[in-house]
Image (cartoon, rainbow, N blue to C red):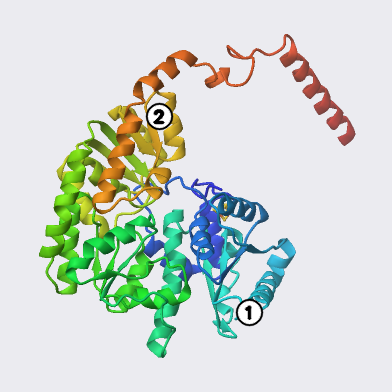
């Protein structure tokens, strides 16, 4: 479940890319490369990218999601989906070398799609090609566009083409938005369930459920409301999302979704309402895009945010790294709350929509690393020796081994509000609780005194394990005897 290494899960990435191009997938690969560019180094370490698309599909009502890929990939993806509480069936079309080579796997996918696409059950069926079917050129674009009114969306999400699972969310969200936009352009479409009676702002990015409510409160004085989000929870919400006055790229890496919004004629606003300055700038940008005044909204929101920041001061040095795409926003909020943040690393790419955050952070001495690798994150942490390291699982493990308090980014961000006054209070509370643990970590490190690390890992070892006496010699003789016996057979 790691699509990041240069060797890839199924052999070399270059080999897979070459195979995919030979099999007719050049256009798909070029589009992925344009939308999700590689960074200064190859690709950040991340889980299998397809998980992002799968998750977006599984979270949508009346949507079936079918994977086509190697059994080991599908096992890992299904396991992870259920670990994160999917509560939905993951469809699977298996293949073997014969069905792949003969093209039968495409027929199997087609049959599965026809069997699944029942309008009484589903609005849409999503089929996701993983690495091997993409490299083999399984042509999902030849699937029917709809069956009995059920939309069929086929996407290629190979680990050798999509750098992170965050961006893979956009691959599916963008494909769905495109489909919905073309539907809306060609005739009347279903009305979204909860339709605001004010002009709306579409928030782009997976957010903690309280955040859209908080953003709605920020926008209300401007006569604006929060519309359905992208990724959406239901097909008809896509029409509502497209029908906004302003689209807010609060997660800045949704390149395909943003393109669809632009093609629908919607203005895009970057950054997000984090902290005092972030919220003020964001409200100004939204107001300018919507042609209204931000004064009333700022007068209502900013004093509350200032109050929350002042009541929850953070007196600590913090490094931030993650693969969610909101790392720069978290760093901004930490700095406004008083923290020193020397480094922020994100697995996501640099896009125009995070530019205000990058400029703000760099003006305050923070090093911003896009497409950050684990090695860069670890080196930055070792160099900065923070009071708290916020990062991915392997970084957190490393930090704890060094006695540095650490916090898993995903748990912190996805389980707490980030925007407006609620975000300011929530983040400060968890940071101060964690930094208080520093002394406990130091005690733990000195208590264990390297037990269980390096060659002492495992029960019963307290030094470098020794070979049993004479074993090397015995093995050498056995190998030689075997080689001699093989030669004798050959003569
Ligand atoms: S789909 Fe590709 S990146 Fe994902 S686990 Fe399988 S081989 Fe790895």
Q: Is residue 71 above or below residue 227?
A: above
> Picture quarter containing residue 113?
bottom right
Whether residue 198 is visible, yes or no, is yes
Q: Is residue 147 above or below residue 447?
A: below
At a point 30% along the width and 27% down the height, the residue shown is: 385
Task: Name the residue tied to disc 1.
Answer: 118
> SS of the residue at dot 2?
helix
Whether residue 449 is visible, yes or no, is no
At a point 39% along the width and 66% down the height, the residue shown is: 230
> Picture quarter containing residue 402?
top left
Question: Mark 1 against mark 2, which lies toward the viewer?
Answer: 1
- Count of residue discs: 2
Name the spot of residue 420 as percent of width and height, x first.
24, 53
At a point 19% along the width and 73% down the height, the residue shown is: 290
Name the spot of residue 222 as percent of width and height, x first.
17, 69
Q: Is residue 340 above or below residue 58?
A: above
> Toward the viewer: 307 or 323?
307
At a point 82% along the width and 26% down the height, the residue shown is: 482
Mark identifier at residue 399: 2
> Toward the viewer: 417 or 411?
417
Left/right of residue 397 with respect to residue 358 in the rendered view: right
> SS of the residue at dot 1?
loop
**Image marks 1 and 2: residues in contact by CB distance under 8 Å:** no
> Toward the viewer: 392 or 408?
408
Left/right of residue 465 with respect to residue 229 in the rendered view: right
Quarter occupied by the C terminus = top right
* Ligand 1 contact, mark 1 (Cβ < 8 Å): no
Q: How far apart, in angstroms, are the residues tagged by discs 1 and 2?
A: 50 Å
């Amino acid at each position: 479940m790691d699509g990041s290494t240069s060797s890839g899960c199924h052999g070399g990435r270059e080999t897979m890319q070459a195979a995919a191009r030979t099999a007719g997938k050049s256009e798909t690969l070029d589009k992925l490369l344009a939308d999700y560019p590689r960074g200064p180094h190859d690709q950040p370490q991340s889980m299998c990218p397809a998980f992002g698309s799968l998750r977006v599909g599984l979270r949508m009502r009346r949507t079936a999601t079918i994977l086509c890929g190697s059994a080991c990939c599908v096992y890992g993806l299904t396991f992870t989906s259920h670990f994160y509480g999917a509560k939905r069936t993951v469809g699977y079309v298996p293949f073997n070398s014969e069905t792949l080579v003969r093209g039968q796997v495409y027929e199997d996918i087609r049959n599965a799609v026809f069997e699944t696409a029942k309008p009484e059950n589903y609005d849409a069926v999503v089929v996701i090609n993983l690495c091997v079917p993409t490299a083999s050129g399984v042509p999902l674009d030849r699937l029917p566009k709809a069956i009995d009114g059920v939309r069929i969306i086929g996407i290629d999400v190979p680990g050798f083409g999509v750098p992170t699972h965050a961006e893979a969310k956009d691959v599916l969200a963008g494909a769905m938005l495109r489909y919905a936009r073309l539907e809306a352009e060609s005739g009347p479409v279903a009305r979204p369930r909860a339709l605001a009676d004010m002009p709306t702002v579409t928030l782009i990015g997976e957010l903690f459920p309280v955040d859209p409510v908080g953003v709605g409160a920020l926008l209300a004085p401007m006569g604006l409301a929060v519309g359905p989000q992208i990724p959406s929870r239901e097909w008809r919400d896509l029409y509502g999302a497209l029908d906004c006055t302003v689209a807010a790229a609060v997660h800045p890496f949704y390149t395909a979704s943003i393109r669809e919004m632009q093609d629908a004629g919607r203005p895009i606003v970057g950054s997000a309402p984090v902290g005092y300055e972030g919220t003020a700038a964001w409200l100004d940008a939204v107001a300018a895009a919507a042609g209204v005044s931000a004064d009333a909204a700022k007068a209502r929101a900013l004093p509350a945010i200032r109050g929350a920041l002042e009541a929850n001061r953070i007196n600590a040095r913090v490094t931030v790294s993650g693969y969610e795409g909101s790392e720069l926003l978290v760093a901004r909020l930490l700095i406004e709350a008083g923290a020193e943040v020397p480094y922020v690393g994100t697995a996501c790419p640099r896009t125009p929509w995070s530019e205000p955050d990058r400029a703000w952070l760099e003006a305050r001495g923070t090093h911003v690393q896009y497409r950050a690798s684990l090695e860069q994150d670890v080196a930055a942490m070792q160099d900065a020796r923070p009071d708290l390291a916020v990062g991915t699982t392997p970084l957190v493990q490393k930090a704890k081994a060094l006695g540095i308090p650490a916090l898993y980014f995903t748990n912190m961000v996805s389980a707490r509000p980030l925007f407006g006054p609620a975000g300011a209070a929530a983040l400060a509370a968890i940071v101060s609780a964690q930094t208080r643990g520093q002394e406990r970590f130091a005690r733990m490190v000195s208590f264990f005194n390297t037990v269980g690390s390096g060659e002492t890992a495992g029960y019963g070892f307290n030094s470098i394990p020794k070979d049993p006496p004479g074993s090397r010699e015995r093995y050498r003789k056995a190998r030689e005897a075997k080689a001699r016996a093989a030669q004798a057979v050959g003569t």
